[in-house]
Image (cartoon, grey):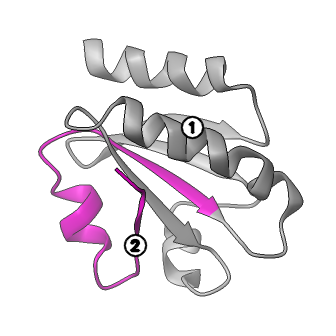
């Protein structure tokens, strides 16, 4: 399953009210490190299909969401569970680090 693009209009329904945990990738077209982790995020979306939703927020277009969650550096990954941020990863990191955060959120 591909990550779903989320906007200010769909954020609440797609992320905050989701029945399953949601990994939100805050990114931008001009961001090199964002492009580096994009394939990892897509792979994880497929690996955890049905257990985890993966969403992408274009920080250049969705400034209100970025401000709300104080996104100061991209890529930033926020992991939401029951509408609350349970984990935050900033920067281009190895797949294992992202997967560790996902597994921790799924276990709790």
Query: Residue 97: which quarter of the image?
Result: top right
Note whether 8 is above or below 44 in the view shown: below
Residue found 72% across the figure and 72% down from its top:
28
- Residue 15 on image: x %, y %: 28, 58
Mark closer to the chain start, 2 or 1: 2
Report crowding for label 1: few under 14, some 14 to 19, many 20 or more residues within 10 A (C-alpha). some
- Residue found farthest to the left: 19
Residue, disc 2:
6
Q: Indicate whether residue 88 is drawn in magenta.
A: no
Query: Residue 7: which quarter of the image?
Result: bottom left
Q: Secondary structure at mark 1?
A: strand
Residue, disc 1:
88
Q: Is residue 37 left or right of residue 13?
A: right
Evaluate if marks 2 and 1 touch, with contact meaning CB atoms under 8 Å apart.
Answer: no
Q: Indicate whether residue 2 is drawn in magenta.
A: yes
Residue found 60% across the figure and 61% down from its top:
26
Note whether 12 is above or below 63 in the view shown: above
The residues colored magenta run 1-26
Residue closer to the observer: 3 or 56 = 3
Q: Secondary structure at mark 2?
A: loop
- Name the quadrant of the C terminus: top left
- Residue 34 on image: x %, y %: 75, 56
């Amino acid at each position: 399953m591909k990550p779903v693009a989320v906007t200010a209009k769909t954020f609440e329904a797609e992320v905050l009210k989701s029945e399953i945990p949601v990994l939100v990738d805050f990114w931008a077209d001009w961001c090199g490190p964002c492009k580096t982790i994009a394939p990892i995020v897509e792979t994880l979306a497929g690996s955890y299909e049905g257990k985890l939703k993966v969403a992408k927020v274009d920080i250049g277009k969705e400034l209100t969401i970025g401000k709300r969650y104080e996104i100061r550096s991209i890529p930033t990954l926020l992991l939401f569970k029951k509408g609350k941020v349970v984990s935050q990863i900033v920067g281009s990191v190895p797949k294992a680090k992202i997967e560790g955060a996902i597994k921790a959120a799924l276990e709790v």
